[in-house]
Image: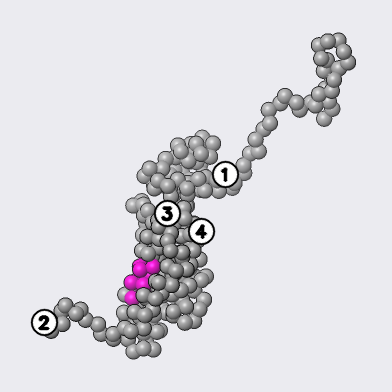
Amino acid sequence: MADVQVGDGSGGRPRAVPASAGKPTSRVRMSAAQRREQLISIGRLLFAERGFDATSIEEVAARAKVSKPVVYEHFGGKEGLYAVVVDREVRALLDRITTALTAGHPRDLLEQAAMALLGYIEEETSGFRVLVRESPLMSATGNFSSVMNDVAHQVEHILGAEFKTRGYDPKLAELYSQALVGMVALTGRWWLEVRKPRKETVAAHLVNLAWHGLSHLEPKPTLVTSRGR
């Protein structure tokens, strides 16, 4: 674009000024897909910090520097945004754990599962906080418990085969898988806040308790307090 000749007001020679000078710089507009990702990222952080009830569409819109109708256009409301955030975290955590379970030996599988969960907590803290808040609006398939149930079902198949080999009742594999996964999950929620000791140490102690307990299982355990009655 050609320069504009402008006088300096003193009668001297005109000076050249770029034609764009003085015009406001326009912001680059986001595509619909980019805006959606931005809103999901903001929603994820707010839901992690405050939970579902304390998060408002107004604040999501304010942080994104858009109007409330833009958020409604993409998600239909706060519930829709929350559902998308939770669904992504559920799939991310389950994929991470499923991918980690590659070993053939049960003890190695325990280590892999524990490290995968602790790694997710360490690297995706906001996502994990969203999941463990357990909004009552979500269905039974859209929360942290549902993810742990999915993992427990995988562990159940592994334990079932191991129980058959050792002469234990394979029908009890479901009970033990829930106990093992629950132990790791609850420890993970505790470690989320304290972050000590390091995750490798936490995983080692989890496996130590689980494995040495499993390796000395009684075929038909009874409560000590009820024996002899």
Res 167 → quadrant: bottom left
Mark linked to residue 35: 1
Residue range (magenta):
176-184
> Mark 1 or 4 closer to N-term?
1
Q: Which residue is the extreme one toward the right?
A: 13
| Residue in view at x 25 percent, y 82 percent | 221
Residue drawn at x 39%, y 71% is 206
Residue 14: mark in rendering:
none
Say which residue label 4 marks. 123
Q: Secondary structure at mark 3?
A: helix
Dominant secondary structure, magenta: helix
Name the N-terminal-most of marks 2 and 3: 3
Residue 102 included in the magenta stretch of the image: no
Report which residue position mark 2 lands on.
229
- The residue sitting at 37% across, 53% down in the picture is 133
Task: Tell me if residue 178 is in the magenta stretch.
Answer: yes
Quadrant of the image occupied by residue 55: top left
Disc 3 target residue: 129
Between marks 1 and 2, how big is the CA–CA gap?
A: 68 Å
Q: Residues within 10 Å of mark 1 (few under 14, many from 20)?
A: some
At mark 2, the secondary structure is loop
Does label 1 or label 2 sit earlier along the sequence?
Answer: 1
- Count of numbered tags: 4
Separation of marks 1 and 3 at Cα, in angstroms: 23 Å
Instruction: Give the left or right position of residue 227, taking residue 87 as reference.
Output: left
